[in-house]
Image: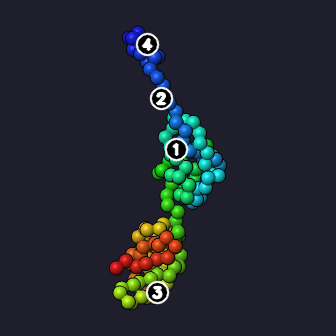
Amino acid sequence: MRWLVLLLALAPLPASAAVLAAARTLPAGTVITAADIRAIDGDRPGLSDPSQAIGLQTRITIHEGRPLQASLLQAPRLIGRNQMHPLVFQRGALRIVTTARTLSDGAAGDVIRVMNLESRATISAVVQPDGSLVALK
């Protein structure tokens, strides 16, 4: 028993690594900038590279001092639910542009459901990096 206590006393302590934390309270939906984060020493898990957080959007409110974790962040939403957007349908030389109502939020590259307002049909569309919608074939 004594050797166990001695062994534990002599064992090196795990080094605490710097992790990124919120420099201020970040409401849900905030796109993170360099001014929103700071490095802290701690043993709590979290992101350590600023490039992993800058430009992403918070899923929930992150209070000041809380370490940033990948599960708390998402790609910025370009399209909000229940918004009107132009929808492009293209097959070969045929190109149709109509207005659609979005049925969910979406980031660049996401496939979302939209309702074509002319036909009332619900279809899938891909959110483009510029925020436009392209109907799936």
* CB atoms of marks 3 and 4 within 8 Å: no
In the rendered view, does 33 fall on the left or right side of 47? right
Q: Amino acid at mark 4?
A: Leu
Q: Report the residue at 52% width, 36% height from top.
A: 17
Residue 6, disc: 4
Q: Give the CA separation, mark 2 to mark 4.
A: 17 Å
Q: Is residue 42 above or below residue 50?
A: above
**Residue at the top extreme of this rendering:** 2
Q: Are marks 1 and 4 in contact (CB under 8 Å)?
A: no
Q: Nearer the viewer, residue 58 or 122?
A: 58
Label located before the other in sequence (1 or 4)? 4
Residue type beneath disc 2: Pro
The residue tagged 3 is 97
Q: Which residue is mark 1?
A: 48
Query: Do we see residue 112 in this rendering?
Result: yes
In this view, 28 is above or below 107: above
Circle 3 residues within 10 Å: few <14, some 14–19, many ≥20: few
- Say which element carries label 3: strand
| Residue named by callout 2 | 14
Q: CA distance from mark 1 to mark 3?
A: 44 Å
Give the SS element for disc 4: helix
Q: Secondary structure at mark 1?
A: loop
Lower position in the chain sequence, tag 2 or tag 3: 2
* Label whose residue precedes the other's in the sequence (2 or 4): 4
Q: Earlier in the sequence, mark 2 or mark 1?
A: 2
Q: Earlier in the sequence, mark 1 or mark 3?
A: 1
Q: Position of residue 134 (x, y in %)?
A: 43, 78
